[in-house]
Image (cartoon, rainbow, N blue to C red):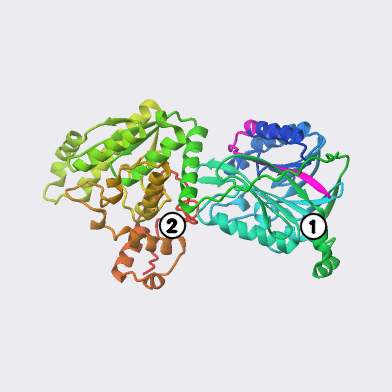
Amino acid sequence: MKVIRLALGQINTTVGDIEGNTSKVISLIKRAVDEGADIVAFPELALTGYPPEDLLLKPQFIEDNIAAVREVRDAVRDIVAIVGFVDRDVDIYNAAAVIHNRHIIDVYHKMFLPNYGVFDEMRYFQSGSEPSVYRLGELAFGVTICEDIWYPDGPVRTQALAGAELIININASPYHRGKSAFRERMLSTRAFDNTLFIAYLNSVGGQDELVFDGHSLVYDQRGRLLYRGRQFEEDFVLLDLDMEAVFMARLHDPRRRQEVKGRRDSGVRRVVIHGHRFREGGDMSIPPLAGRMDDEEEVYSALRLGVRDYVEKNGFEKVLIGLSGGIDSSLVACIAVDALGKERVKGVFMPSPYTSRESHEDVALLVQNLDIELTTIPIDGIFEKYLHVLAPLFEGTEPGVAEENIQARIRGNLLMAVSNKFGWLVLTTGNKSEMSVGYATLYGDMAGGFAVIKDVPKTLVYRLAEWINRKEGKVLIPERILIKPPSAELRPDQKDTDTLPPYEVLDRILRAYVEEDRSFEEILSFDCEEECVKRVIGMIDRSEYKRRQAPPGIKITPRAFGRDRRFPITNRYRSH
C-alpha cells in the first residue's frame, strides 16, 4: 500500500496575535513529527488570525507575519508543513506556505476571493493565478484555500487532472445554521467527481461577530466520509490514507483519461519535494468520526464559544447581565455561566413600578439555579425623578413610549456605570426578532459591549431555553419563564403582542424579508395578513439607524445584520 500519514491542526487562533499563533503552530508541528506524520496542515491565515481586516493595510503587520513564516520554516524537520499566512510580492495574497526541512518549497496564492456576506477579501488581496501539484515520493497532492474548493471547475479540478491524488484545503469558514450539512455534501461531491482524497481543515474559535466551527472533514476517492473533526473545539488528528486506492479507482475511469489528455499541463506548476523519509510499517491510524450536533446544540455551542472567546481574547475579567425575569436574559445568563464559569458572571435586577411579582420570583430562582451573584437595584425613585424633571416639558401630553423607554435607559445607565467602575463587560440580551423591528431601546436595553443573541430569532430563543433544561437534566431556566407571555414590563399588563404580531408569525416574515429578500407579494403568499406584513416591513426599514448603534453580536443565521446585510439608513425605497 502507498500510505501517507496526514496531521490536521484544527486550532483556535487570535487575530493579531502573530507570536501566539506561531507558537501554537510550531508546537503542533513538533507533535506531528513525533507521531510520524508525513504532512501537517494548519488553517487559512493561521499566523495572522482570520479575518485580519484593516490590519492588512499596515506594512509592519505584513512584515511581522512574514517574519513568523520564517520562524516556522526554521522549526520544520522531516515533515511537510502547510501554513496559512499573508504573502507579499508586488501585492499581498491570502497564501499557504509549503515548507519542508527548513525550506519554503512553494507558496500557493488563493485563487477565488470571496466578496459577499461577511467576506471582503477583494478589498485586501490580489488573487492567485496558478495552482500547484506537489510530488512527495510517490504521492502527488495539491493545496487550496477555502473558497477555491467550492467551484466544480476551479483549481481542484485542474490539480486532479494534473495527477493530484489528495487535496489539502485550508479554511477559515465561519459558522451559520445549516452550513455544515451543505458543506459536507459539497465536499463529498468534489472528492467523488475528481477521484481523490480531500482533507478539509477549518479554523475554530470566536472572532468578534464570527464563530469558526472547526468540523474538519476528510473524504476518500468515492466521496465517503472518513473523518469528521470536533465542532467548536480545537482538534488534532492523525489519519493514514491509502493513496493506492485513488490509482485503482482511476484505472477504471476511461472518461477521466479523455479530460486528462487535453488539460494535464494546463496552467499547473509542478514542484518536487526531495529528501523526505517516510515511516516504515506500523498500524493504520483511523480516528473515530465525531458525531454531528443537532440544531439546538450547534447554535448553543456557537454562542458559548463566541462569548468565551470575545471575553477571553479581549481581556475582560467578568461579565454583567441585566436580568429581568424574561427568557432572553435567562438564556444569555445560562450561556455566560457555561462559557466562563459562575464566578465570572454577575447579575443585576432593576425592578420598576411595573415589574411583576412573578418576575421577582423568576429572577431569584434563576440565579439560585445558576449559583451566580445578584445585585438588586430598584429604579422606582430614579424613574420618579426623571418624570418630575420632565413634567414641565411633557405637560399636556399623554404618557407613552417616551416614559416607558426612560426605564430602559435608567437600567442601561446603571449597567454601564457598574461596567465602568469594575471593568466588567455588559452582555446585552436583545434577540434578532426585536432588533429587526426596533423593539429595543437605544441607550437602554441596547447598551452594552457584546450582544450575545443579537442574531437569534425569538422562536429559536425558546427552543434553546428548552434544550438547556433537557441537556442539564434539571430545570435551569424556570418553567414559568418558558410559558408566560413575553413582556417588557414597562407599563401595566404590557405584552409584546400589544405592539408585535405573535413571534411565530413575526419570525416567518423576518426570515423571508431579511434573510431571503422576498418581495411583499411573496410574503403574503405565506398566509400572512397584508396589514401585518406592511407594518413589520415598515418597522424593519425604519430601524436601521438603531441597528447601526448596537454592539457586535454573534452571527448565527445565514444573513446577520451588519456584516451580511448593509442597508442605507437614509432610504426612500419601499417594498410595499
In the displayed orientation, state which residue is furthest to the left.
396
Work out whether residue 148 or residue 473 is closer to the camera in this orientation and state it: 473
Q: Which residues are magenta?
A: 1-20
What kind of residue is marked 2? Pro
Whichever of callouts 2 and 1 sits on the residue coming sooner in the sequence is 1
- Residue 488 position in % (x across, y down): 26, 47
Element marked by disc 1: helix
Residue at x 36% of width, y 53% of height: 458
In the image, is 415 to the left or to the right of 28?
Answer: left
In the picture, measured across the screen, residue 144 lies left or right of residue 337, that is right
Q: Position of residue 342 (x, y in %)?
A: 40, 31
Residue extending farthest to the right is 275
Q: Which residue is mark 1?
A: 246
**Residue 15 located within the stretch drawn in magenta:** yes
In the image, 226: left or right of 161? left
Q: Is residue 451 visible to us here?
A: no
The residue at 60%/36% (across/down) is 16
x, y (%) of residue 391? Answer: 14, 42
In three-dimensional space, the C-alpha distance between marks 2 and 1, rounded to whole angstroms, equals 52 Å
Residue closer to the observer: 110 or 7? 7
Query: Residue 568, which numbered label?
Result: 2
Identity of the amino acid at label 1? Answer: Val
In percent of the image, x 65 and y 35: which residue is there? 60
Depth order, front residue of 293/379: 293
Residue 384 in view of the camera: yes
* Residue 424, magenta (yes or no): no
Question: Compared to 373, does 383 lie above or below?
Answer: below
Label 2 CA crowd tier, 10 Å (few <14, some 14–19, many 20+): few
Q: Going 28% across and 51% down the picture, which residue do you hit?
A: 483
Mark drawn on residue 423:
none
Q: Quadrant of the C terminus?
A: bottom left
Camera-side residue: 473 or 404? 473
